[in-house]
Amino acid sequence: MRQNKEETLNHLYNLILNPATRDWERSLLSSTKNALESGSNFDEQLSKLEAELRPLALRNNLTPNMSDFYNQMTGNTTATAQFDFTNHSINDLNHQDSAVFAGGCFWCMVEPFETRKGIVSVLSGYTGGHMDHPTYDQVIGQYTGHVEAVEIIFDTRIIQYEDLVELYWQLTDPIDAFGQFQDRGSQYRPVIFVNNEHQRQIAEKSKQQLEQSGKYKRPIVTSIEPTSKFWPAENYHQEFYKKNRTRYKRIERARQQHLAFQRLQGKIRTKLSRFTKEP
């Protein structure tokens, strides 16, 4: 993609001022900005910056906004697609509602919900913590108390909250309090956030039924908590399954293998339990 000098300088300024930009990223950006303002060749400076960022970009070690900028420089328009936040709102109070779930990395929590009939929008973000405007680095550093979560807006004429809770159990490991699958840390703990007493009753009843099913040998540790401020994640994380299909599929495959093995164990345990109860 051919870069426009004025737009690129604007991006550089914004990234330099962005508190989420890491110091070493800011140093590279500042050097590029100063060189361009001194009259250095635009294409040469941009190529130099791309080469300096490339090793970290290939290892997915850039901050989210830097990743968007790098993908824009390299013409990866799919990865830089902007999430339309205007569509993520309840526009019909009579027939729309919201639900919030945390179940490990939010990258793998979007597609299963978003592709269901009756889902209006799914937003990746951070919630349950004590800091305003958290960044991805702060959350994964466990400085803010937030968890990665998804906020779902759905049409109650087509799909019910009970359906979403049931799907949530199918996507997560309810006996792991210290993360989910390969994702470790308190920011990945499983939580059902409820908006009101109606949602709480549904979630608690569903959790109790799961506990009584005999599918799991260990206790169900998924917590049920009241919703708090939901902070949208950076654009890089929104609809990740569309933007980074290969990487998403690799992570999702490992997740599904774990769940499949867990379900098999549950079926065996349930059958054995029925057998031992027979006279």
Image: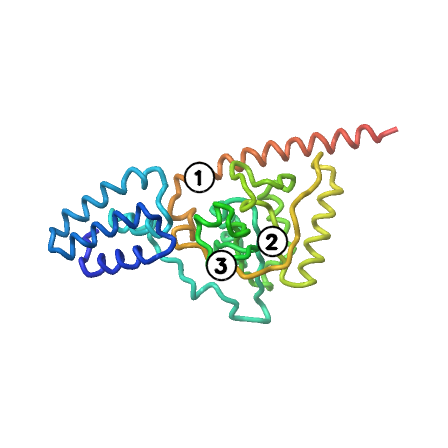
Counting every numbered tag in the picture gives: 3
Q: Which residue is at a point 47% across and 63% down the rendered structure image? A: 88
Q: Residue at x 61, y 56 (%)?
A: 193
Residues marked 1 and 3 touching at CB (< 8 Å): no
Q: Nearer the viewer, residue 167 or 98?
A: 98
Residue placed at 30% from the left, 55% from the top?
Answer: 16
The residue under label 3 is 231
- Residue underneath mark 1: 249
Q: Nearer the viewer, residue 97 or 227?
A: 227
The residue under label 2 is 164
Q: Which is more N-terminal, label 2 or label 3? A: 2
Q: Position of residue 11 (x, y in %)?
A: 27, 57
**Residue type at numbered disc 2:** Leu
Quadrant showing the C terminus: top right
Q: Nearer the viewer, mark 3 or mark 2?
A: 3
What separation in Å lies between label 1 and label 3 (alpha carbons)? 26 Å
Q: Is residue 177 above or below residue 94?
A: above
Secondary structure, mark 3, is strand
Q: Residue at x 37, y 55 (%)?
A: 19
Q: Residues within 10 Å of mark 3 (few under 14, many from 20)?
A: many
